[in-house]
Image: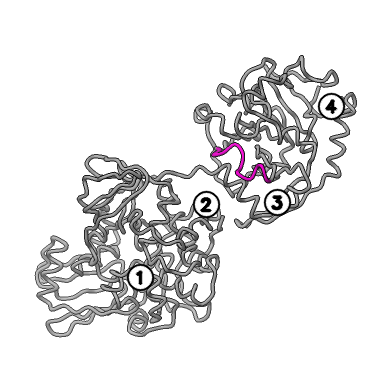
Amino acid sequence: MEVLEFIEEQLRRWPQAAERFRALEGVETKSVMMPCGESYRVQFNPVRAVSTRAKVDPAAIAARPCFLCAGNRPPEQMSLPWEDLEILVNPFPIFPGHLTIAAREHQPQSLQGRVEQMKRLSRALPGYTVFFNGARAGASAPDHFHFQAVPSRFMRISSAYESYELDAEGAETVDEMINAVCTDGVLTVIPRRKHRPECYDEIGVSPASIDLCGTLIAVCREDFDALTGERVEQIIREVTEQEPQLYVGLTGNAEEFTTDADGLHTVSGVRIGDGFHWQRDETFRYGGKMMKYRGRLVNRIGLEEYLKSVISSEMSATSSMELLKAHAVISRSWVLAQMRASRARACAGVPIKEADGADFLQWFDRDDHEGFDVCSDDHCQRYQGLTRQTSPAVAEAVEATRGLVLLTADGQIADARFSKCCGGAFELFENCWEPHHHPYLEAGPDAPAAAPLPDLTREDNARRWILTSPEAYCNCEDSEVLAQVLNDFDRETTPDFYRWEVNYGVDELSELVHRRSGIDFGRIEALEPVRRGPSGRIYQLKIIGSRRSMTIGKELIIRRWLSESHLRSSAFVVDRRGDSFRLRGAGWGHGVGLCQIGAAMMAAKGFDFRAILNHYFPNTILK
């Protein structure tokens, strides 16, 4: 007998069940908009109280007969055999065609040993989505194994939480705190953090698979009316979120730590600004767990707690709320993208020789660190533990954007980058790191869409641009805004971030380049830009010396070789006057992605965090 024929015959024989199915035609629903930007359906279905209000503690289960065992079912209830299961019409339906598929023998609600069976069942029920509610994830019969199934058109996975598609081996290891859905053999497992939300006694919602896939069920009128988009998203996140744990390698020579009675760790000798002009060693306190890997201290910390420290460490904790929200989203996106990336480069970078005339082309980027995910310094993101995590505003911004990331058009988490000051124009990713174009890291002006950006790859245009002070969001002299963005040591050491100047004597420059590069060029005679990016940044520079000449790149190598620490940026022009070189430049940092000072000015002008992200990361989706 086909399933549809089976349902039709069952409802003909069982008038009470048929009446509940007919009632679905008039069931009241509403659509609410969640803060994450997704709509969600809420259904008022009083007959589901038998499931939502079910007591599932061991004593209650032991005191009642199992309603899925054949001997305890109503005499009207039919079954359709399939493998060691029986297909049943659910007498308390949420949607038309709602099925329960129960084991013939009484056994616990566990997915172990049944993953492949779940896939087969989904293929045997075309047009249906089969789902599994774990023993503490919405199952009203945790003592008797069963699947359920509804037509696939009623089910969708929400992006308000993170789902995981697992193979059979991975899903076999999960416990009772999961929901799983399977359509046409594709299995998605949703890990649970809680059985029921904190508001269960106030709003009687007990989310199971259907509730997490687009339709939240309310069993009384008051609950239905009280469920707003904000409340729905809060409930979904509360029961499903399992915060990723991040392993952060501490930089510097710190080898020991002390732990107080509250479980907080104090570490001395943690390096900040390694290799930069603000380099120093400091003492910080950390939460989470502290461990060692090959002599290096590694801090295991939850992602959201990590972000609260990063944002306070990267900029002043007094920054505007919209700027903090924007930074929370990009920092979260960046670290998740790095955790998921498989990169083979070493942390120190890999020198690469190309056939286009460059003699030494090297870039530095985050890689899969051995023993930890990211480091604690500017090489990745500044992370200074609880010492910098003192601002309620930062905590509020992280919580307000919890889980929000930037996605590419194909659904991947964007590799969101940021720097202090772009100098008025954005640079391309591929001119700073590996030669891979990201359509969300485009060139453009850091200004309202008005006059187009000049072609700064041309030397004459780049010179005019750098030697003037064009209007841009980051062309800022507002001390209050700058105080929001720059930490004390940033304001101390880098007051000239938008346009700057450095002067060297020939002998001074020759000795500096020799010492910083390890290459004896002899007496430096000229510095000639070979290739510039669309922000005017040089990513190939020819150094001409009396003993040898060499074309080098990319931008960070250029900045390192021409400074005791790091030149502000590689967007500069060179003038040789007698025995001196004058370098005049624009911006601070690589200029890719978000410009922190520009974003601060946008926030000061009234732009919200969504508009800020759209300006710096076009072609992305915020979810």
Q: Which mark is residue 403?
A: 2
What crowding class fits label 2: few (fewer than 14 Cα within 10 Å), some (14-19), or many (20 or more)? many
Tell me whether the residue at label 1 lies in contact with that at label 2, contact meaning CB atoms closer than 8 angstroms.
Answer: no
Which range is magenta? 192-202
Residue closer to the observer: 414 or 390: 390
Instruction: List the residue tagged with mark 1.
Output: 486
Amino acid type indicated by mark 1: Leu
Q: Is residue 108 above or below residue 364?
A: above
Q: Which mark is residue 227?
A: 3
Tell me whether the residue at label 2 lies in contact with that at label 3, contact meaning CB atoms closer than 8 angstroms.
Answer: no
Which of the two labelled residues, at mark 4 and mark 3, occupies the earlier sequence position? 4
Disc 4 to disc 2, how far (Cα)? 44 Å
The residue mark sitting in front, 4 or 2, is: 2
Snapshot colouring = one colour
Residue closer to the observer: 496 or 545: 496
Which of the two labelled residues, at mark 4 and mark 1, occupies the earlier sequence position? 4
Please indicate whether residue 489 sits to the left or right of residue 442 in the image: left
Disc 4 to disc 3, how far (Cα)? 37 Å
Tell me whether the residue at label 4 lies in contact with that at label 2, contact meaning CB atoms closer than 8 angstroms.
Answer: no
Q: Which mark is residue 5?
A: 4
Element carrying mark 2: loop
